[in-house]
Amino acid sequence: MAKLCHKPLHILFFRHSLLGRGGDKMVVCQANALARRGHQVTIRTATLATPFSLDDRIEINLTGSSSVAATLMDLFKGRFSFDLLIVDIIPLAVLAGIRFGRTKVIYYVQDWDVSYYRSLAFRSLIRLLYFVERSFLRIPVIVVSEHLLGKIGRTGIGATYVVENGIDLTLFNSKGRLHPAFAPGHIPTFLLFIRNDWRKGSDLALKVVKKLADRYPHAFGVVAVGNRPAIRPSQIDWIDKGFMDERQIADLMKQCDLFLYPSRHEGFGLMALEAFACGCLVVTTTAVGFAHDIENSLVAEVDDEQGLYSRLCCLLEKQIEIAPLVKKAEEFASEHPLELCMDRFCSVIEELNQ
């Protein structure tokens, strides 16, 4: 049974969109958890297209904003009531802090917003906004990892809490796996997440797989989820699954041997954690802060195509003992149940409003 709060609050999540990304999933989970604890929860957004289930008690306000600029203007001039406003991108955090003051706003940091931009001018502007928030506005901050906190900076005296993301361990677990990852006597299957977002490194994954297929034809297969890839090497079996719900993703992770995820930037790395829990070996980059090379995964530097390639070659040539890595990864995932994450998040919210 959900813990009931002593002082119900009206909590407003203010967003431009609520979709099907990992960060959207966490916001839905948080809104649901707060509603179960007796709070009045409202989500105000321009776009609502999420596959994740929202509690019936949550109120949805669709703004109809046609652009991010319109969403910013809605925050600055719109009329809405709340006890506490939660935002998760730095431009909204700064605007909200200026308009409502630090006691009414929480900045929920899921990502380092500088990473969204390639332009030096925009990157400099976002860095400036972080400096303003951390040094002058000092809005209370909840950040999803120590790794990310190191990026946004610890400047200033605003209250700062680290609440790591969690996963549904009843769904993401290794029960039902037909065989351990890279079990002898079968051709391993690589799982790829293809997303039209430079930060997620899908282009690197495809380049590395192409090189591997040229060197080791028919030595492995690929299952890809998400967007349709630009290339599919003919030397290996390749299956495109398209977009799938989280139950289907969990089932797929239990069938695959390896999750290749050469991300250039992560706030936390939720999908890598889900693969950990499912007993699927993760090959990734230092962008995933909890992944450690030859400890619980195989990890190359960001944008290190050769580093990824060499590690995968070692795997296919059976030069790496995989079972200890997978065991350590599962142990780490077991320490991050969704219920614990949500309880911690709600407790911080309530603590900030005592």
Image: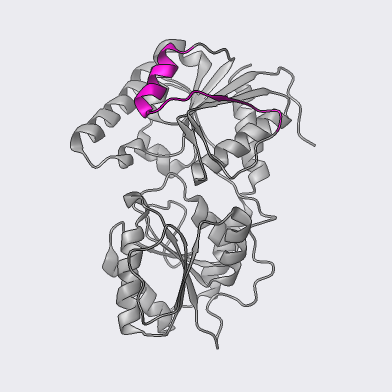
Q: Residue 128 at x, y = what percent? A: 27, 26
Dividing the image into 4 quarters, which one contains the C terminus?
top right
Left or right of 127? Residue 299 is right
Q: Residue 243 at x, y = what percent? A: 51, 56
**Which image quarter: residue 232?**
bottom left
Which residue is situated farthest in the bottom direction here? 185
Which residue is situated farthest in the right direction here? 1
Residue depicted at 73% across the width and 25% down the height: 38
Residue depicted at 46% across the width and 11% down the height: 100
Near-viewer residue (236 or 156)? 236
Q: Residue 59 at x, y = what percent? A: 64, 25
Residue depicted at 59% across the width and 15% down the height: 83
Give the magenta range.
56-78
Magenta stretch: includes residue 71: yes
Q: Is residue 174 visible?
A: yes
**Which image quarter: residue 311?**
bottom left
Dividing the image into 4 quarters, which one contains the N terminus?
top right
Which residue is situated farthest in the left direction here? 120
Q: Residue 275 at x, y = what percent? A: 54, 61
Residue depicted at 61% across the width and 17% down the height: 353
